[in-house]
Amino acid sequence: MAFTLPPLPYAYDALEPQISAQIMTLHHTKHHQTYINVLNATLASQAAASNKNDIVSQIHLQNNLNFSAGGHINHTLFWENLIPSSSPSAQPSSAPKLSAALTSRWGSVSNFQEKFNAVLLGLKGSGWGWLVQDTESGILEIITSKDQDIVPAGKKPLLGIDMWEHAYYLQYLNDKASYAKGLWKIVNWKKAEERFEGNFEAVFGVLAGLRSSI
């Protein structure tokens, strides 16, 4: 099965001024597409190695698979949890259950946002910031992942923020703080609520099988 670039649920300029159309176009059609291209090529090479019973090649290909599959999964989740600021879904009120859980955990939604941004700005190099829910305890947590690592097993991602430079640099240069602050105006709280109430596999949709393979 070859993977394809999923269309965005909004126009490339729909997230302005928080994220420019230029960044969205490059990020989606170039960066995300490259992860998919490498993923498909790696899966083909892995299948060929498997047919030859070439265990060494399969092991060597695993890093490429993890990186490219993670890039595809993480970016897909990222696009889904953004929405134009004019949408009612961009308001925390569209996620009443999650907002209540955030308030219980951090005192208020705004306190959570401050804690989350502090974690984002503390990232060294490239990576992601995540709001996750522990699948056993139900506790909400703020975590990070390096490069294109996916959220670890046992943690259900509710919200993911891309902190690679390609996500903001053309617009914000080295002002990561303004990028992180502005994103709260375009968070899709309704989608985060759906993830909060849904099961683990539902978060990943058609990519659930790919998620389980890395």
Image (spheres, rainbow, N blue to C red):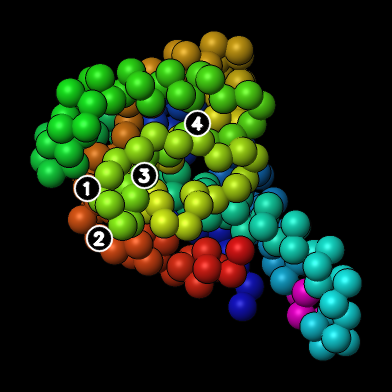
Which is more toward the observer, 15 or 172?
172
Q: Amino acid at mark 2?
A: Gly
Which is more toward the observer, 115 or 209?
115
Dot label at residue 21: 4
Q: Which residue is mark 2?
A: 198
Q: Which residues are magenta?
A: 44-48
Question: What residue lies at 80% left-to-right and 83% top-to-bottom?
Answer: 50
Q: Is residue 76 left or right of residue 14?
A: right
Question: What residue lies at 61% left-to-right and 38% top-to-bottom?
Answer: 146
Q: Mark 4 or mark 3: name the one nearer the start of the chain.
A: 4
Q: Which residue is mark 1?
A: 193
198 up-or-down from 91: above or below: below
Determine the secondary structure under disc 3. Answer: strand
Q: Which residue is mark 3?
A: 132
Q: Quadrant of residue 104?
A: top left
Q: Is disc 3 in contact with disc 1, using a CB cutoff of under 8 Å? A: no
Q: Residues within 10 Å of mark 3 (few under 14, many from 20)?
A: many
> What quarter of the picture does the C terminus occupy?
bottom right
Q: Mark 1 or mark 2: name the one nearer the start of the chain.
A: 1
Determine the secondary structure under disc 2. Answer: loop
Residue 25 in view in this figure: no
Q: Is residue 46 magenta?
A: yes
Question: What residue lies at 57% left-to-right and 25% top-to-bottom?
Answer: 123
Q: Amino acid at mark 3?
A: Val
Q: Residues within 10 Å of mark 1 (few under 14, many from 20)?
A: many
Q: CA distance from mark 4 to mark 1?
A: 27 Å
Q: Mark 4 or mark 1: name the one nearer the start of the chain.
A: 4
Q: Amino acid at mark 1?
A: Glu
Q: Quadrant of residue 13?
A: top left
**Where residue 100 sits: x, y (%)?**
12, 36
152 up-or-down from 78: above or below: below
Q: Is residue 196 magenta?
A: no
